Amino acid sequence: MNKKIVNLGIAIVTLVAVAGTQQAHAATTADTTVNLSMQSFAAITATADIIVAPTLAQIVAGSVTTTDQPITLTIDSTNGSTVTVEGDGNTVGLADADLELNAGAGWVSAASGGLVPLYTSSVTQSAANVPVNVRISNLSAYEVGTHSNTVTFTIVDSD
């Protein structure tokens, strides 16, 4: 029975000796959290001006459609977006009523006053290129020369 006590005593002495050799270090830490609070956004750019020059056959038919020379919209949005288009209200140059645009979902008149969506997406977009074809009708009403209409594309984030 004495032997068990001696062995136990040695174990305790050994633990105390090991603990006694450790040096105490003073260390402190501090944490902070950096939060980025992103707001939803949508941005749009359009290609430069385009020139539509109808052929004689298109003039006789009454309209011209640009499928090989679309306007390209570049869209960035966090939650998807809706794009509308509005003509400049021009009655002297190229009339809003004679100008239609299509981004794949159907023709929208420039005379719509920006009330009809030209393009809609429900997903995040990063530099998405959206081609927009142009159709001009009532060609026989226009005299020789250049007739212009500055269309405005408006983008709204779909949050």
Image: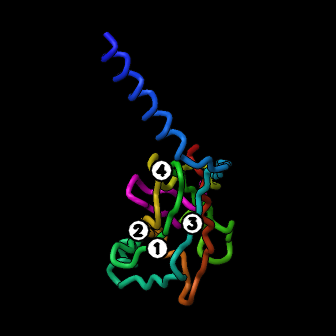
Q: Is residue 107 magenta?
A: yes
- Residue holding disc 2: 131
Query: Which stretch appears magenta?
Result: 99-112
Q: Is residue 17 above or below residue 10?
A: below
- Three-letter amino acid code at the position of disc 1: Ile
Residue wearing tag 3 = 44
Query: Which residue does the numbered mark 1 point to in the structure image?
Result: 71
Q: Earlier in the sequence, mark 4 or mark 3?
A: 3
N-terminal of the pair, mark 2 or mark 3, is: 3
Q: Secondary structure at mark 1?
A: strand
Q: Are marks 1 and 2 in contact (CB under 8 Å)?
A: yes
Sequence order check: which comes first, mark 1 or mark 4? 1
Disc 3 marks a residue whose amino acid type is Ile
How many C-alpha atoms fall within 10 Å of the one at disc 2: few (<14), some, or many (≥20)?
some
Q: Which residue is mark 4?
A: 120
- Whole-percent x and y of residue 141? 53, 75
